[in-house]
């Protein structure tokens, strides 16, 4: 097994179903938490260098956070298609796009490893905090390369190494300590967090001009409950599984997390400084 492949015992169909259900469940709250990732989104769009008139695919688009900002950059004359396996996420994004005066945002629910778009259809593709979720990132990248025109661009972000992302790892470590191993093994969200690993994966998929840039951002929370809720609002399938636990177990988890994050206390609240990798590449 490599970092690019799922763990032993992995049930791909069940995993994708859980992710779809989980992200559909948290669609509105995920969108409401956009402030957590505002600087990350800005950095990713800067790496994408979109221009008016371009046709853009936003993969693992969720509720269209990136897609809506990208649409503003390619108008007039261009368009953005938001794609995600969770149709509820896309519906949430379309509602918000209409409210923001972007009624022409396009959306299509599909599996990133089996895209339903024609060859060479897009000028650019975006994947914000999504590549590590796909069971087979190399398959998804092959599909992205197929639907990009020659010379088309890819810009994506992934979580950095575990020790560089306490925003996620603090909660995950607590869950791993208190609960049995999950019935559906999950690929690590940190598996592409080393620059050399991500660079090699992109090169193997046939992309050139690969550039990797670390981006550090900070998140502040008024209390431990706010941190825990923010983690759940990012967690997709993991949040879905946690929601099925007895209330007493969920309460014990919240209490344990509150103890574990004391190292991040800053005044009356908590501050987490975390790192993502921003990658750009060309077909």
Image: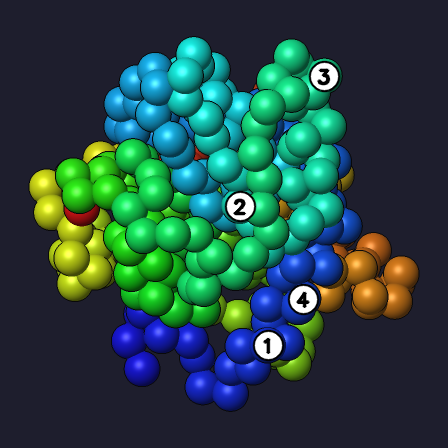
Marks 2 and 1, the one that precedes in the sequence: 1
- Tell me if residue 264 comes above or below residue 171 in the rendering: above
Q: Is residue 264 left or right of residue 269?
A: left
Q: Which mark is residue 83?
A: 2
Residue 103 lies, in percent from the top left, at 65, 21
What is the CA distance from the residue labelled 4 to the residue labelled 2?
A: 18 Å
Viewer-proximal residue, 226 or 141?
A: 141
Residue 86, how many percent across, how many down?
65, 52
Question: Mark 1 to mark 3: distance in Å?
Answer: 35 Å
Q: Which residue is mark 3?
A: 99
- Say few, some or many: other residues with alpha carbon within 10 Å of mark 2 (under 14 / 14 to 19 / 20 or more): many
Disc 1 and disc 4 in contact, CB within 8 angstroms: no
Query: In terms of secondary structure, where does tag 3 sit?
Result: helix
Q: Earlier in the sequence, mark 1 or mark 3?
A: 1
Quarter location, residue 94 = top right
Image quadrant where residue 70 sits: top left
The residue at 54%/24% (across/down) is 68
> Disc 1 or 4, which lies upstream in sequence?
1
Can see residue 111?
A: yes
**Which circle's residue, 4 or 2, is located before the other in the chain?**
4
Q: Residue at x 41, y 16 (%)?
A: 77
Q: Nearer the viewer, mark 2 or mark 1?
A: 2
Q: Residue at x 34, y 66 (%)?
A: 139
The residue wearing badge 4 is 18
Residue under label 1, please give it.
13
Q: Residue at x 16, y 57 (%)?
A: 206
């Amino acid at each position: 097994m490599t970092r690019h492949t799922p763990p032993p015992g992995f049930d791909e169909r069940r995993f994708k179903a859980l992710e779809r259900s989980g992200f559909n469940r948290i669609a509105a709250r995920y969108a409401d938490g956009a402030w957590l990732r505002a600087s990350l989104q800005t950095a990713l769009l800067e790496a994408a260098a979109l221009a008016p008139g371009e046709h853009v695919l936003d993969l693992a688009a969720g509720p269209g956070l990136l897609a809506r900002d990208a649409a503003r950059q390619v108008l007039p004359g261009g368009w953005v298609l938001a794609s995600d396996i969770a149709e509820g996420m896309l519906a949430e994004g379309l509602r918000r796009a209409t409210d923001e005066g972007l009624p022409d945002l396009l959306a299509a629910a599909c599996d990133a490893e089996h895209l339903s778009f024609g060859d060479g259809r897009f000028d650019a593709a975006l994947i914000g905090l999504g590549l590590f979720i796909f069971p087979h990132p190399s398959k998804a990248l092959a599909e992205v390369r197929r639907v990009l025109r020659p010379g088309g661009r890819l810009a994506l972000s992934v979580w950095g190494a575990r020790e560089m992302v306490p925003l996620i790892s603090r909660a995950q470590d607590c869950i791993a300590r208190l609960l049995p191993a999950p019935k559906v093994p999950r690929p690590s969200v940190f598996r592409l967090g080393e620059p050399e690993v991500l660079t090699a994966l992109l090169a193997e998929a046939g992309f050139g001009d690969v550039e990797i840039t670390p981006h550090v951002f900070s998140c502040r929370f008024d209390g431990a409950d706010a941190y825990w809720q923010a983690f759940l609002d990012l967690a997709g399938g993991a949040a879905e599984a946690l929601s099925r636990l007895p209330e007493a177990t969920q309460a014990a988890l919240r209490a344990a997390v509150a103890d574990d994050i004391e190292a991040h206390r800053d005044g009356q609240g908590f501050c987490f400084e975390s790192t993502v990798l921003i990658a750009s590449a060309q077909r």
